[in-house]
Image (cartoon, coloured by chain):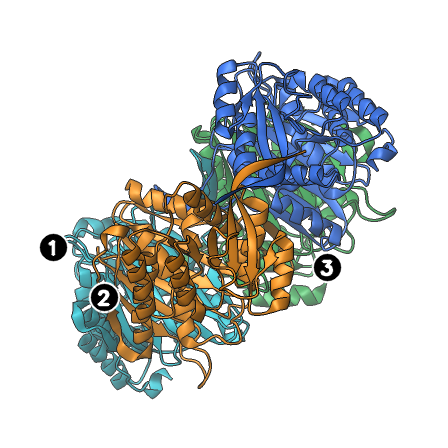
Chain colours: A cyan, B orange, C blue, D green
Amino acid sequence: MNDEATSVVRVGVVGAGAMGAAHVQTLTRWVGGARVSAVHDADPERTAQVAQLAGARAAASAEQLVGADDVDAVLVAAPDPLHEELVLACLAGGLPVLCEKPLATGTEGSRRVVDAELAGGRRLVQVGFMRRFDPAYVELRALVRSGALGDVRAAHCVHRNAQAHPDATSEGVLVNSMIHELDVVPWLLDDPLAAVTVHAARVPAGALRDVQVAVLETVAGAVVTVEVSVNARYGYDIHTEVVGTAGTASLTPPYGLGVRRAGLSGRVVGGDFVARFADAYREELAAWVQGIREDRPVGPSAWDGHRANLAASAAVESLHGAGRVEVPHEPTPPLYA
Amino acid sequence: MNDEATSVVRVGVVGAGAMGAAHVQTLTRWVGGARVSAVHDADPERTAQVAQLAGARAAASAEQLVGADDVDAVLVAAPDPLHEELVLACLAGGLPVLCEKPLATGTEGSRRVVDAELAGGRRLVQVGFMRRFDPAYVELRALVRSGALGDVRAAHCVHRNAQAHPDATSEGVLVNSMIHELDVVPWLLDDPLAAVTVHAARVPAGALRDVQVAVLETVAGAVVTVEVSVNARYGYDIHTEVVGTAGTASLTPPYGLGVRRAGLSGRVVGGDFVARFADAYREELAAWVQGIREDRPVGPSAWDGHRANLAASAAVESLHGAGRVEVPHEPTPPLYA
Amino acid sequence: MNDEATSVVRVGVVGAGAMGAAHVQTLTRWVGGARVSAVHDADPERTAQVAQLAGARAAASAEQLVGADDVDAVLVAAPDPLHEELVLACLAGGLPVLCEKPLATGTEGSRRVVDAELAGGRRLVQVGFMRRFDPAYVELRALVRSGALGDVRAAHCVHRNAQAHPDATSEGVLVNSMIHELDVVPWLLDDPLAAVTVHAARVPAGALRDVQVAVLETVAGAVVTVEVSVNARYGYDIHTEVVGTAGTASLTPPYGLGVRRAGLSGRVVGGDFVARFADAYREELAAWVQGIREDRPVGPSAWDGHRANLAASAAVESLHGAGRVEVPHEPTPPLYA
Amino acid sequence: MNDEATSVVRVGVVGAGAMGAAHVQTLTRWVGGARVSAVHDADPERTAQVAQLAGARAAASAEQLVGADDVDAVLVAAPDPLHEELVLACLAGGLPVLCEKPLATGTEGSRRVVDAELAGGRRLVQVGFMRRFDPAYVELRALVRSGALGDVRAAHCVHRNAQAHPDATSEGVLVNSMIHELDVVPWLLDDPLAAVTVHAARVPAGALRDVQVAVLETVAGAVVTVEVSVNARYGYDIHTEVVGTAGTASLTPPYGLGVRRAGLSGRVVGGDFVARFADAYREELAAWVQGIREDRPVGPSAWDGHRANLAASAAVESLHGAGRVEVPHEPTPPLYA
């Protein structure tokens, strides 16, 4: 072995919860051209633990991280309400930033991020819609684009979490969970969302509005159903089928174990979305790092993050009783074209 | 072998198209206590052919069949517009009748049938919603009722025909195809339909509105999506998954062949709904005949046929631009309780 | 309704255990042209119960049934050691007989049955290899014959019973369970068996030799593996995949319920082979009855029963330590050609 | 970004065919602690191309690579006949080496490698049995070890290549393809192989002996079937099911696309084993590199490579007509315990 000089991207990570820790491990173990150099979390103990995992320094505050000499790029996995300000700080510092979804907690916030990036004139923001990097989603999109399915008329998505976070809200089902579909569906179909209607199952008074079903209409006229369940109990489960005039295509279940026991023949369903999308996260981070090294932004942009917020906002309005709500159409700024 | 006296139900069949001919074959081959005694179709050649299949007489008109001495019960598989009048004639004659869906071409018609049966004070009508006899639907319903799925929050149905009939209309997608789900979903969940919203995919001007997606809301508050495609091309395909708070349950694909060839590993999908539901039709006819022999009506009633019509009518209204349409609630007459 | 004369086959059933009772129900409920007229079982109570099910008389002995005036044909579902003598009695009486497998408990016995039938010069015996009537097996065989799989090089069979009969023996695993594959494989491939090698998993001393794996070699040179497990616990499960030079084809799992719960997504596996092969039994009995009515024997013959016995006998020899054992080739008598 | 000193393992790769090139890409893209520093292939053009991929130097000979100052460890992906001598050269130089399977082209060769490593007294060799790193195999092994399946009685493996290499031989089906199962099965079950019987399907004279089915017997008495097809045409397909007294467990199909078209509902089967085992290769190389960094050998050893060769040699003997052949039992040297 030999000590040698190589050029690596030094990543500062803000937020060391489950998602942040997983990103730190992925960067450390799997992404050749990157190194986690600094970690900050509101919880100093968690900061220290996760920093140690990566051989990184523990930063006492986000300020001590964003803009520090040993940080070339920032990964934001902090609580949602902090996303906007952290991303704006990175933009102010000219730092590439990968921000977990949502980009901001509302459409005004995500618009502010877009405006700040536009003002800088340079794409620095990637939003953590990792499904765009999932191998089967990528293949599915390629199949749709190839025309092999004919014209797309419908799609069906199921998004089930094993167990809701104790702080989950009925709006969060849309804003935190369904937002993945609100981003990935228009990307899959290459067809923006035009309207959304949310139908929530009735639940006991005061309970979380779970299950929620949205019907998305695309600009080209496809009809997309999305079920989100946040207490599915049996595991974390993601399905998507695209229905065209010449056939359908879907994601298969992830690779793993099949079992036959106790009157059942089936496959094991994991409960963990980090494991389910391990390849997607790995590809996402590798693409981000490679994009930074080549100064060539890739992946979902701030604009994509803003558009998902526009759709999520329409969905929340629908949930609150507005029926069918149109998703505002805002022209794509040239920077994102 | 020996000639002997047995008591069999002599069935007159009106309509000898694909469905009528299939029923004649099922009755002849599989249903011990029945015999097809007379057949009538508007096409004399078809009448003769199908009558010969069963060793039955060819009736020159429906009138020569309904009420004839050799007809104990009538199976109506004639074109939809004739259903109402044929069923009313049977009711007038006090004859048990199994009528293919829809019971009548509109809610006024199905209401007239219900009223006529109520006036007679005796249940004579069974509607051909054969899915209620399909073994997996029956098991699925039992599982729902057992409580093993917890509270039902959602369900997803897919109903795909390989190829639309040349005369298919956009309304027919709902009235002829989706009507099966409009009947079977409330039966499965033991929970009537409260509202329906139809979202039809955009198609080239003048083309059949295919694919259509309906969202059904039940009285108890479950949300049910139903996709109907009438030109699915790859085959006839029926899915249903019920989503409860403790797990989900679904119909598996029908038994048949798996193949691995040309880059695919999968199962063969047939194009034929008669074959797909062969067991259901067999059970349906056997139950009908047994019910007649025991003077104990079974299966979907005229009231069920009327309620499906009410839902289909609401769906058509929604398709025509009315958005979410409530399904009228009419109290169940005691005869059908 | 009307009483009328029809010509039906009056079936006498010998053996009213689970299999016999199931056959009585199938004949009564599903097979139009037949009627169970008499039942006999060594257990008078069971005789009475099952006879009542069918509205048949209870016969005090097999002799009172075979050859009685009210019995046109006999179904033998008695214990295996009685098969030979009952079938011989039917042959002596010129009666069509459907005998559950095995046709006799050894190759000498089955040869005696064949010789008796040959002496009579008329095919009267059908052996209860019901899988030949299973719809997916029938389709699989048609696909093999069509050439669509290319040349068949291999096949894999799995045959799992949920729980062994308390009297099960290690030889019985082959003679009672694997015998289905020993019959159906050469029929599927249209290619007789040439040799068999049995590999039994090691078990605690004195325990039933379960699991057993046989390798069958066909005359044309295909290699077929057959696993039989008689205590699979999780359910009754049958698989067959045929491997050709152009692809493979297999039986899919039977139709039923899929469930997602407790970390698993799968399908329900039943424990009951009668339910698993309900369609096959129905088709088997209907074809038998129709064959009798048309005086045209169908289905597996006494010769097929004898050939399966030859293969099973070779398998037992292999199990007892003989390694690879050739299946004796006996030329097919013209009556069975 | 910043230039900084890090300690990385500099890997020299011998052999730049499909497998070698894939390893170079995996190391470069995915394995953080490693760098490909030198590449050699008999074909200078390929050497140059693959070296460029990795930013490595092109070595003119294997000698210029093994033992060079810029090579900390060697990956051998050269043609099989060169494996032994290259591994011996690495051992002579005290270099960690990952050698593609087989470790040597015969049992004498693999024994010589073992002896050389034993003489050195230090484990330096890892053999490229990558399936041991595949996530589902790892889970399957853990499940077997947990006892959840009860006692293992049988297993079934299918190993199908889409298309044989033009130079493929009948022995190669065993030595190059089935060798994966000959390694992974005893590892999965933690139970060495005791005997092997190969049954090859009959093929036209002179043709490759494809399909071959082996029955493996383990020391503990389990019976394992392995089908290898090298011209499966439809794709590359790997199955393994372990059958225990309490249930079975299996690998599910890999993640990817499902499609419904042209009368089929299924999943896409890829033709490429590198893609199929991408995760396994990634984990294999990462574990190798990490093991080198920590001076803690992991993964399949030279001894494992030798044992697989012993089994493959027995299989070849069986193919050549020897029937059931016992796998020689050689006591495990302490270095490998």
Q: CA distance from mark 1 to mark 3?
A: 72 Å
SS assignment at label 2:
loop
Mark 1 surroundings: few (<14), some (14-19) or many (≥20) residues within 10 A: few
Q: CA distance from mark 1 to mark 2?
A: 28 Å
On screen, D235 above or below D228?
Answer: below
SS assignment at label 3:
loop
Quarter assignment of residue D201? top right
Please name the residue that numbered disc 1 is placed on: A206
On screen, B209 above or below A40?
Answer: below
List the single residue furthest toward the top. Answer: C206
Q: Position of residue B95 (x, y in %)?
A: 41, 54
- Mark 1, mark 2: which one is toward the viewer? 2
Q: Residue at x 38, y 70 (%)?
A: B105
Amino acid marked by disc 1: Gly
Please name the residue that numbered disc 3 is placed on: D42
Please name the residue that numbered disc 2 is placed on: B328
Q: Position of residue D76 (x, y in %)?
A: 63, 50
Amino acid marked by disc 3: Ala
Q: Chain of mark 3?
A: D
Q: Chain of mark 1?
A: A
Do the residues at discs 1 and 2 belong to one chain? Answer: no
Of residues B35 and C75, the one nearer the viewer is B35
Mark 2 surroundings: few (<14), some (14-19) or many (≥20) residues within 10 A: some
Q: Chain of mark 2?
A: B
Instruction: Assess whether mark 3 and mark 1 are in contact (beta carbons under 8 angstroms).
Output: no
Do the residues at discs 1 and 3 belong to one chain? Answer: no
- Residue B254, can we see it? yes
- Residue D91, can we see it? no
Which label number is shown at residue C68? none
Instruction: Assess whether mark 3 and mark 2 are in contact (beta carbons under 8 angstroms).
Output: no
